[in-house]
Image (cartoon, helix red, strand yellow):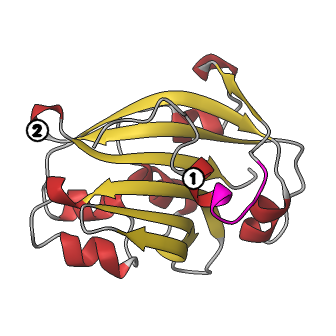
Amino acid sequence: MKVSPDVLYPLSLMRASRNLPGLSFEKVEPQDLPEPYLSLLVHEGDMTSRLEGHHESPVKVRRLRSSNNGNSYLREVILETEDDEKAVEYGAIEINLEALPKEAVPLVLASHLPLGGILNDHRIPYSSAPRAFLKVAPDGPIVEAFGTVEADYLFGRSNVISGLGGVVIAQIVEILSPA
């Protein structure tokens, strides 16, 4: 899997497939992110464990849309807390199924667990490399995803997860819920 030059990919693809307009966003420097976004977004680990620690609850996937060609699995999702089903992240991910051990693929395709949790549970070595930090104007689909948004901007990141030898496991766009 090649990394797309579009920092909003795969979210841009998922939204275009629904004839939605492009997101209004700007790239921001990490030091310009307000807390708690700075702590939640600026790291080289997985988002799953950060969100679980911050919200003091395991998180699960609510799949909105998905596509699978056998090699790549794309999904547009909301991550929500298990305890109260609060939406904590909206985004999209493209997962390179060929980069995962066979036993992890059915878990990814079931779309119940975030990829970071699956990688950690199965001790799959990986590195995370944020490509851009984003300041996003919430539009209708984002407001719908979170239920309500009482903020002028939300923050997120574009991230690439790689395995051994630099093989790309996933491309992700993660937009966090209002603080």
What residue is rendered at 76% in x and 52% in y? 178
What residue is rendered at 17% in x and 69% in y? 104
Q: Which residue is mark 2?
A: 164
Magenta stretch, main secondary structure class: loop
Q: Is residue 51 magenta?
A: no
Query: Mark number for residue 13?
Result: 1
Does dot 1 land on a helix, a strand or a loop? Answer: helix
Q: Amino acid at mark 2?
A: Leu
Number of other residues with Cα within 10 Å of mark 1, as a class: few under 14, some 14 to 19, many 20 or more = some
Q: CA distance from mark 2 to mark 1?
A: 27 Å
Residue numbers of the magenta segment = 15-21
**Towards the viewer: 72 or 55:** 72
130 in relation to 77, above or below: above
Q: Is residue 36 visible?
A: no
Judge from the rendering whether residue 176 lies leftward or rightward of residue 75; answer left or right. right
Judge from the rendering whether residue 9 lies leftward or rightward of residue 67; answer left or right. right
Q: Is residue 154 visible?
A: yes
What residue is rendered at 79% in x and 72% in y? 147
63 in relation to 41, above or below: below
Horizontal and vertical percent position of residue 63: 52, 76
Query: Mark number for residue 62?
Result: none
Horizontal and vertical percent position of residue 158: 52, 38
Q: Is residue 19 magenta?
A: yes
In this figure, what is the number of numbered marks?
A: 2
163 in relation to 67, above or below: above
**Towards the viewer: 11 or 130:** 11
Does dot 2 land on a helix, a strand or a loop? Answer: helix
